[in-house]
Amino acid sequence: MIRGGQERSGFDETCEALYLTSGYVYDRAEEAQAAFKEEIDHFVYSRFGNPTVSMFEKRMALLEGAEACRSTATGMAAVFAALMCQLKAGDHVVASRALFGSCQYIVTEILPRFGIEVTIVDGTDLNQWEKALGVETRAVFLETPSNPTMEIIDLKAVADLTHAAGARLVVDNVFATPVLQHPLEFGADIVVYSATKHIDGQGRCMGGAVLGSAELCNDILKPFVRHTGPALSPFNAWVLLKGLETMELRTEAQSNNALDIATYMSGLKGVAKVIYPGLTSHPQHKLAMKQMSAGSNLISLELECRDGEDGKKAAFHFQNALELIDISNNLGDTKSLITHPATTTHQRIDAEERSRMGIKESLVRLSIGLEDVDDLKEDIAQALETI
């Protein structure tokens, strides 16, 4: 996370160099021809590759324990590229139901437009996975912990079923981060990240990453990314390199804060339910602690509502009463943030499906930052008192 992938220029700079260039020059026309035919190692165009972006990709691969990495402009570009680069009309995809709203849109709305059959399963039910994977399948997609209900999916069990069906397992590891969970160790084939979240961690820029085997990243994914154009900008790659240097320290401190706050909120009046993988009250706590080294910095909670009371009203009132924690749909930031998934990240999903996903109107999602934990507790307590 500090020195991985570093390539110094002839100036021997300490900090990684920022190469803000769209193109590259050649000494001779024959050299340009050889570069485009990949007969020599030479950058040809920053949509294809860039020295700063390359350093970020190498560092991410080292951190994840993957053979290779391809970066993208955003996390959603990473998800779409990881799936679409390996799919064609007539293929079958299986995905978990509990997904981030935009991921769910790709799986349920975009893929079927290209003649791709999609089966949705409840991620915690291995019987549903086994049934869905009883037919030939090309790709499987899931996130664990899920956004925002913190469902934990058994990675090894699903990976085994995926491979038996001849498919590749794609895991969105954003909530767990590459620090707290290593899906490749449990049999995943591809790991995707929104680098916008914990990797940057300071609300500055967007980016994405897809990690896996050299064959997948270089032979299958690279042509798709090159020719469809979701390239990560060199400036954003440079910012993300700086973020990686402190990510482990931030993630561990934020996770410790989150566990403290989740424990504290479990006994507060006005809180109906705290959903956090690090608590023994979580239904998949043992599995979470088997797969993750900590519960992450994300907490979801359901607020208490009187009979007939509008859950959204309580959620809005609570958010509006907070004085320190900011209302924002981002996560993984050093600043603590809160959002109401039913009206933000998952608003386009109809109410019935949100209910099946466990996203109630009274549910809010907290991303715990690096503020003093007692200040955060005080803010939460005073906001609850106003409801």
Image (spheres, grey):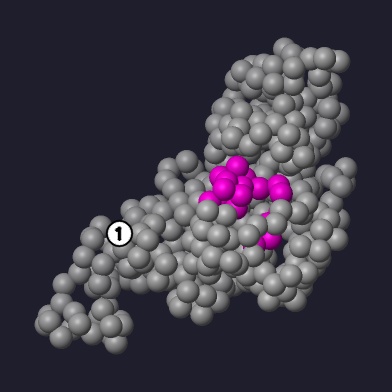
Q: Nearer the viewer, residue 296 or 209?
A: 209
- In x, y percent, where is residue 151? 76, 48
Range shown magenta: 93-110
> Quadrant of residue 308 in the image?
top right
Q: Nearer the viewer, residue 187 or 289?
A: 187
* 219 drawn magenta: no
Q: Nearer the viewer, residue 320 or 124?
A: 124
- In x, y percent, where is residue 115? 55, 60
Task: Identify residue for label 1.
Answer: 18
| Residue 31 in the figure: left or right of residue 261 | left
- In x, y percent, where is residue 370? 60, 39
Residue at x 75%, y 76% (from the top left corner) = 164
Residue at x 78%, y 51% (from the top left corner) = 122
Residue 213 shows in this picture: yes
| Residue 228 in the figure: left or right of residue 320 | left
SS type, badge 1: loop
* Picture layout, residue 164 above or below residue 286: below
Which part of the image, by quadrant, shows the C terminus?
A: top right
Residue at x 69%, y 41% (from the top left corner) = 148
Label 1 is placed on what type of residue? Leu
- In x, y percent, where is residue 32? 19, 79
| Residue 111 in the figure: left or right of residue 153 | left
| Residue 26 in the figure: left or right of residue 116 | left
